[in-house]
Structure formats: C-alpha cells, structure tokens
Amino acid sequence: MDSFFGYNYAGKPFAFFDAAHIGALITIFLLNIYLLRYRNKDESVRRKLRLTMAIILWVNESSWHLWNIVHGTWSIQEHLPLHACSVLIWLAGFMLIKNNYRIYEFAYLMGIGGALQALLTPDIGIYGFPHFRFFQTYISHGLLVTSVIYMTIVEGMRPTWKSVLRVAVISNLYLIVVFGINHLIGSNYMFVAHKPVGPTVLDALPAWPWYILYMEAMGLVMFLLLYLPFVIKDWLAKRQTIAA
C-alpha cells in the first residue's frame, strides 16, 4: 500500500507526456464523449448522474486533505481551498446538484482554463503513475472540466457577455483578497506571492510581480477564447434568422 499511498514515493516519478500522462488525458477525453449520450435521457437519470459526479468530486478532494493529514503535511499555507481550482471543485458539486447558473459561469470561464493547465502541467512533484496523488489530481481536475462540459452540452447552460464581465470583476476582487491572505499567513494561493516551485507555464513569464499582469492578460484571453464558440453560434443563428 505504501507504493500507492506512501508519502516518500519510490516509484517512477511523474514525467510530462509519458504513457501514463497521455493515457490520463485520453481517458478524460473519452469520458466527455461518453457523457454526451445523456442528452437523450430524462431528468431523473441526468439528476442521478449529476449527483454521482458531485459526490466523486467531493470525496476525491476530501481524500487529498485526509492523505495530507495522515502524513502530517497538512497546513494552512498549502491546503486551504483558496486556489481557483480548489474552490471551483467544491462549488462544482453544488452546480451539478442544484443546476446553479452563477456557479456555472465561474466554472466554465475559470475552471476549464485552470483545470486544463493543471492537467497538462500538473504540480504533483514525484508522484507519478500509479500513486494515489496521480489519480487524485486527474480525477479532480478532469472531472471539473467534464462537469462544466456536461452542464453546457447536456443541460444546455451557456455563458453570456455579462458572464465574462461578472467573472472578470469578481475574480480580480478575489485575487486581492487572496493576496492579503498570502501576506498574513505566508502562503502562495493563486500563485500571486511567487511562481510555483514545480515546472509550469509561468516559468516562461517575467519575475514577480510582472508575471501577475501576464496572468491577468492570459486569463482574459482564455475567457474570450472560451466564449468564442457562443459568439460564432449566435452569429450563425442571426444569419439564419435574417436569411429566413
């Protein structure tokens, strides 16, 4: 069991885009394709599926905290649910159960971008396949993406321009709050105190504090890219209306 749950992992360390990494990404992709079949299911079936996904999200995230508590590594500097993905993983469960549109806006515009970065360049150190941490990371971030795609395609939710504005304003206010918390407790939530230790896309950016401005710009570009399919959809619908 130590090879799966152990803190001092002696197995093969995580490597970007090795067979295990690519396999995890393909599995998440296939899961999204599979869930498209639920568009033809009635509400009672879809509600059970949403509840199942919510429970998996919450249990999986709780297991990460429990693992750290057992190994004596849990701390307020590392494990409070203040990173964007951590907050959205908890909130996504309520989104799924309650069909909550306000949470959906944030999960779609912030969750997909953040989770995709975590899936492509995960901050999991030495914990490669088949360690618990490997599975926990890909379940949490993969299911966050899947839950948003599900709510969009199967349940018919979509963001609007007001969603983009609302998420941009509130996320920046949240960033200010987290910056203050980091200053008080010596943490690095949202990576606004310094760059993460492990290799990430932030390594290509300038030093603190300038990389935060780049993060802001990258976030805005991501919002617009994620909204672009709906811009195209609305434009095509308008053209068809005019043509008719």
Image: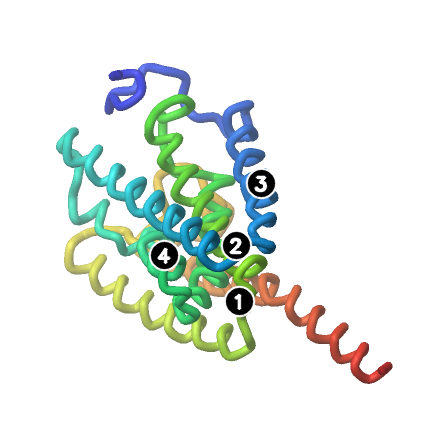
The residue carrying mark 1 is 157
Q: CA distance from mark 3 to mark 4?
A: 20 Å
Figure label count? 4
Q: Would residue 12 be found to the left or right of residue 82 on screen?
A: right
**Residue 53 or residue 201, whichever sits in front:** 53
Kind of residue at badge 4: Leu
Q: CA distance from mark 1 to mark 4?
A: 17 Å
**Residue 162 or residue 52, whichever sits in front:** 52
For residue 88, the mark is 4
Q: Nearer the viewer, mark 3 or mark 2?
A: 2
Residue at the far right in the pictured view: 243
The first of marks 1 and 3 along the sequence is 3
Q: Position of residue 44 (x, y in %)?
A: 44, 56
SS state under label 3: helix
Quadrant where the C terminus lies?
A: bottom right
Does 107 sit above or below residue 2?
A: below
The residue carrying mark 3 is 29
Q: Nearer the viewer, mark 1 or mark 3?
A: 1
Q: CA distance from mark 1 to mark 3?
A: 20 Å
Does 209 sit above or below residue 37?
A: below
Q: Position of residue 6 (x, y in %)?
A: 25, 21
The structure residue drawn at horizontal position 38% and vertical position 61%, both measured from the top left corner, is 95
